[in-house]
């Protein structure tokens, strides 16, 4: 195979690969919630079943070794993009049916597993297809395009669905068309990446003796993770840091969409796409950027408590919105922007803590395990959030969200962090 195929300009494939990586995740986690709400599924069912869709990301570390063992990562990427497209098309075609909820959920499961596997393959391929210097250079580029995919999914596509709802006068048809458009986009990703992705010479499946070694090493790294000092505190922090946010994120969009007579705000689908999916994601991203800058100056230990306050205290804006019940887009947008800015800023400490506890001989594997527990921390509380909201109403639910921030503050008291961790060393 020619060296031209072995190496391709990273600008030709890094942006598109990570843009493609983000879209199915945001569709499964956020867009599906809005779609089901507009199709009149109860908050209890929405929160329970869409929270189950976190499972592939929870158990992703368990099957990541098999991606190394079976086939090339390039082939995994191409295959998963086909399956993601098929899953999206399946959702589109089942929405108009009488049992759309069960059928569309089945396709969302396919989408979730394909997306999680695509993540594994893409991140592995990133290291194979780039030199060490290029990996460092493109880390910000890949993150930017991943964020852009979030705005596309949660913002642009939701605004499009809202426009189609009005123009077609048929909510079911509007969402079918929207999902067909995303499926078509993945058809294009498949064709593009099939021809553009490089063929790194080291992108090879593990040999038999290597596969035994990989599985043995995997078991060893898994055991080593649970032998870490203060593992109970570590797991408690990972699972409880976002206890409130994990419940809020499943109910925020339904609350914004619900009519005022049931305690909601009464925004249209397009307005939610603008406020929560566009302005909100931009502020979330800005918060993360600011968080990274300030930690690089004084370290994670210094900023841990301000960031815990930042991710939790702004949740009170939903209490205010539930009691005021205004549909003023400027007011609602400002409140959501403030909450998401705080979330992005506070989330920086969380991600850096995962890096901190993963340091050592098995840092890549331990970080993957830590992110699995991170997904578990979002999955379990999210499952009961819809049931609780329907039981006590939006006002009391958002008050409960503020109470649910307390365990995160308590566990943080016991967290040990090196004073210099996160500080950028000057040359």
Image (spheres, rainbow, N blue to C red):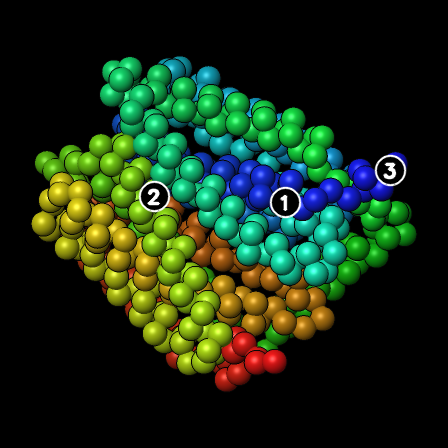
Which mark sits nearer the N-terminus, 1 or 2? 1
Q: Residue 165 location, x and y as percent?
A: 28, 22
Image quarter where the C terminus lies is bottom right
Residue at horizontal 54 percent and vertical 76 percent from the top: 424
Residue indicated by mark 2: 278
Q: Quadrant of residue 286?
A: bottom left
Q: Which of 330 and 115 is in front in this view?
A: 330
Up/down of 307 relative to 81, above or below: below
Secondary structure type for disc 3: loop
**How far is disc 3 from disc 1 in space, using C-alphas?**
20 Å
Give the residue furthest to the bottom. 419
Q: Do the residues labelled 3 and 1 touch (CB within 8 Å)?
A: no
Tags 3 and 2 touching, CB below 8 Å: no
Q: In whole angstroms, how far apart are the C-alphas of marks 1 and 2?
A: 25 Å
Residue at image mark 1 = 11
Is residue 368 or residue 379 the one in the foreground?
Answer: 368
């Amino acid at each position: 195979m020619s060296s031209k195929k072995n190496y391709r300009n990273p600008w030709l494939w890094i942006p598109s690969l990570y843009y493609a990586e983000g879209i199915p995740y945001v569709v499964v986690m956020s867009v599906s919630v809005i779609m089901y709400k507009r199709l009149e599924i109860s908050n209890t069912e929405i929160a329970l079943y869409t929270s189950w869709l976190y499972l592939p990301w929870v158990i992703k570390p368990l099957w990541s070794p098999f991606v190394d063992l079976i086939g090339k990562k390039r082939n995994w990427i191409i295959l998963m993009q086909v399956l993601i497209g098929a899953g999206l098309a399946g959702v589109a075609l089942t929405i108009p049916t009488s049992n759309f909820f069960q059928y569309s959920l089945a396709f969302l499961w396919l989408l979730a597993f394909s997306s999680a596997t695509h993540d594994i393959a893409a991140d592995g391929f990133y290291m194979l297809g780039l030199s060490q210097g290029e990996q460092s250079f493109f880390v910000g580029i890949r993150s930017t395009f991943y964020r852009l995919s979030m705005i596309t999914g949660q913002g642009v596509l939701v605004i499009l669905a809202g426009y189609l709802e009005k123009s077609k006068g048929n909510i079911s048809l509007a969402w079918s068309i929207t999902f067909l458009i995303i499926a078509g986009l993945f058809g294009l990703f498949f064709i593009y990446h099939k021809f553009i992705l490089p063929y790194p010479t080291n992108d090879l499946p593990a040999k038999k003796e290597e596969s035994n070694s990989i599985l043995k090493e995997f078991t060893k790294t898994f055991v080593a993770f649970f032998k870490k000092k203060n593992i109970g505190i570590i797991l408690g922090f990972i699972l409880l840091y976002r206890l409130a946010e994990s419940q809020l994120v499943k109910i925020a969009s339904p609350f914004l969409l619900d009519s005022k007579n049931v305690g909601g705000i009464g925004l249209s689908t397009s307005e939610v796409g603008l406020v929560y999916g566009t302005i909100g994601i931009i502020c979330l991203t800005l918060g993360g950027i600011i968080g990274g800058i300030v930690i690089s100056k004084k370290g994670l230990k210094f900023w841990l408590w301000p960031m815990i306050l930042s991710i939790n205290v702004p949740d009170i804006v939903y209490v205010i919105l539930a009691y005021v019940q205004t549909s003023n887009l400027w007011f609602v947008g400002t409140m959501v922007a403030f909450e998401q800015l705080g979330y992005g800023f506070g989330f920086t400490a969380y991600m850096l803590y995962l890096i901190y506890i993963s340091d050592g001989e098995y840092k890549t594997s331990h970080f993957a395990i830590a992110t699995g527990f991170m997904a578990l921390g979002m999955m379990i509380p999210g499952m009961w959030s819809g049931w609780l909201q329907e039981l006590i109403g939006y006002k009391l639910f958002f008050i409960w969200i503020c109470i649910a921030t307390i365990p995160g503050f308590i566990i943080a008291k016991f967290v040990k962090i090196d004073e210099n961790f996160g500080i950028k060393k000057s040359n």
